Image (tube, grey):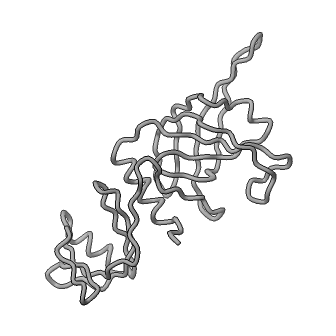
Amino acid sequence: KFRLIRKIKNEIEFVPVGCVEKTKRLLTFSEKINIYLPNEAVIFQTQLKGVSSDNIIRAAIPDMVAQVDRRKSLRLVVPETMDVKVRFYKMVTSPGRVSGTQAFLKSCFDVSAGGLSFIVSKMEQKFFVKGDSINPLVLEFENEKFELGGKIVNLIPVDPSARNNLMYGGFRVCVEFDKLVAERRENLELFVFRHVDLD
């Protein structure tokens, strides 16, 4: 909980709630800390100044505070060095042909608490139609696995590049999540905030 703000010392004070010892262990080797206020959708990163013997945490007043617009979640374009994947099945029906199911495991191009996108080849594009639902859809990142559902809201043509490994171009499939439970939304927002370049 926030305790007070000392503008003259450029300092915020707050105290841990719940497991005090766990909080102190987490802060022991930290220089910077990320603060997220879920009820206000406010996030910021700041310099940790120290933890006193009576468990008061002192941190610098941040240079910048961001408020996430719930309609437009903070979005992370996933770096090549980061492993964020989406796993799902897609059914295809064609007139006069047997229905088929195709398994997909794709690296995310970008991700937010509102949705994600991934790249498909021109051959795979036949499986994806705007307005289609993908359910279940399993999002995997940092030892987390979330089973979600979503709807395809856009297909954007992309040119071949070193990043997408396409030979002949393809499409970026944009998926909007169905309504997320609060805990999953907070986990996703925290993940994005930890890795996004706020500059």
Q: Give the x, y percent position of residue 144.
A: 46, 52
Of residues 118 and 154, which is closer to you in this image?
A: 154
Say which residue appears at 35% left-offset and 61% top-offset: 42
- Image location of residue 151, percent across then percent down: 55, 33
Q: Residue furthest bottom?
A: 9
Residue most extreme to the right: 168
136, above or below 160, in the image: above
User: Is 145 on the left or on the right of 132, as rendered?
Assistant: left
Q: Residue at x 52, y 40 (%)?
A: 176
* Residue at screen point 63% across, 38% down: 154
Q: Is residue 19 above or below residue 113?
A: below
Left/right of residue 35 with respect to residue 6 in the rendered view: right
Q: Residue furthest top?
A: 96
In the image, 119 versus 88, the foreground residue is: 119
Relative to 3, 40 lies left or right: right
Quadrant containing the N terminus is: bottom left
- Give above or below for 175 relative to 108: above
Residue 70: image location, x then y, percent:
40, 49
Residue 103: quadrant of the picture: top right
72 horizontally vs 18: left or right: right
Q: How many marks?
A: 0
- Where's residue 56, x and y in %? 18, 79
